[in-house]
Amino acid sequence: MTQNRVINSLSYLSILFLPVLFPLIVWLLTGNNPEAHRAAGKAFWLHLLPAIVAIIFIIALGVSGLYMDNFIHSGWLAVVLMAVVVIVAVASYLWSIVRGIQYLIVS
């Protein structure tokens, strides 16, 4: 149980030192340990979420740029989408730290 807590915590806290790679490695190597496997999978997708959102918004901005005639509207759309990406990234970062600490504190 203690080993699972440390591995689970490191999967989330790896956002500080090895964001996507460490949870992916733990996720792939812990197939026989369901608790660590589930926590590493959740940490992996939580770390990957800002990149996925950013890629989707870049595609949306590119497609909308093809159809908008006014550069001002396209610029405002870019600012709004960038703000959403920043909010998602900060929330993901903070939630990863909170979950990592929760795994260490809660027994």
Image: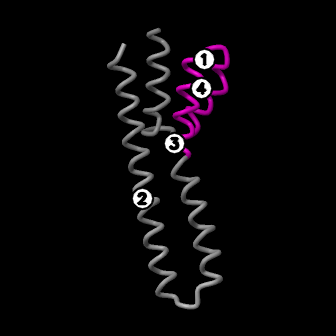
Image coordinates for residue 69, horizontal then vertical, percent: 58, 91
Residue that protrudes farthest toward the bottom in the picture: 69
Q: Which residue occupies 58% across, 73% down?
A: 61
**Callout 4, which amino acid?**
Val
Q: Which residue is mark 4?
A: 26
Q: What element does badge 1 sit on?
A: helix
Question: Image quarter for residue 100?
Answer: top left
Between marks 4 and 2 in the image, the one whose residue lies nearer the viewer: 2
Q: For residue 47, which numbered disc appears in the image?
A: 3
Q: How far apart in space, not on screen, are marks 2 and 1 (Cα)?
A: 32 Å
Magenta segment main secondary structure: helix
**Callout 1, which amino acid?**
Pro
Q: Which residue is mark 1?
A: 34
Q: For residue 86, which numbered disc appears in the image?
A: 2
Q: What element does badge 4 sit on?
A: helix
**Callout 2, which amino acid?**
Val
| Residues marked 4 and 2 touching at CB (< 8 Å) | no
Q: Which residue occupies 32% across, 19% down?
A: 105
Q: How far apart in space, not on screen, are marks 4 and 3 (Cα)?
A: 14 Å
The residues colored magenta run: 20-48
- Residue placed most toward the observer, 36 or 80: 80
Between marks 1 and 3 in the image, the one whose residue lies nearer the viewer: 1
Q: Which residue occupies 41% across, 44% down?
A: 93
Q: Earlier in the sequence, mark 1 or mark 3?
A: 1
How packed is label 3: few (under 14 Cα within 10 Å), some, or many (20 or more)? many
